[in-house]
Image (cartoon, rainbow, N blue to C red):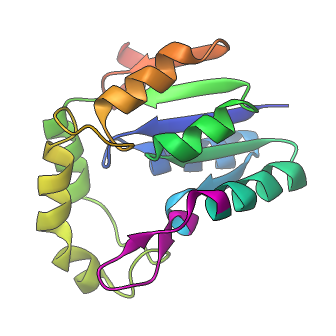
Amino acid sequence: MRKVLIFGNSGSGKSTLAQELKDSVGLVHLDLDALAWVKADPPQRAPLAESCATIGQFMEDNEAWVIEGCYSDSLEYVATEATELIFLNPPIEQCIDNARNREWEPHKYASKAAQDENLEMLLAWLRDYESRDDVFSLSAHLQLYNSFKGRKVMYTSNNRDAQ
């Protein structure tokens, strides 16, 4: 059974690719954004143990899945069960364009207007991808990619057919 882990910067195309795999191959999809945050002002990360417990239950309940996110701490937990790993690593400007053109994500925001209110903050955050030193950073993602011993691929463009 396929167990696919997709990760990369915000705006890199993770959700789009996961949805494609869900639709074309029939994998059950888990977006880590759905469980990584506690509703608070400002938003706060949920405790890692809670997130991992939910992820573990998801993996136990589903034989074939695609899990996507940018949280290397949660991704490390998932990587032990994944059969393949996909690292989406397009240029920052491509991520910015994708974020600007993103459709409304009703599972994350109450309205498109609410989503758009966070756009400038999101763009500033994803511009720092290469310089940050946190669980969302390029360095953390490269470490995860390099340590994975199974089938893996890194795409440096949203045009995956051209690579």
Residue 34, quarter of picture = bottom right
Front residue of 139/159: it is 139
Check if residue 46 falls in the magenta segment.
Answer: yes
Check if residue 44 falls in the magenta segment.
Answer: yes
Front residue of 106/37: it is 37
- Residue 27 in view, yes or no: yes
Q: Position of residue 99 (x, y in %)?
A: 24, 55
Q: Residue at x 50, y 75 (%)?
A: 107
Q: Position of residue 87 (x, y in %)?
A: 45, 28
- Residue 89 in view, yes or no: no
Quadrant in which the N terminus is drawn? top right
Quadrant in which the C terminus is drawn? top left
Q: Position of residue 140 (x, y in %)?
A: 38, 31
Q: Position of residue 21 (x, y in %)?
A: 63, 41
- Residue 28 vertical placement versus 25 (above, below): below
Residues drawn in magenta: 35-49
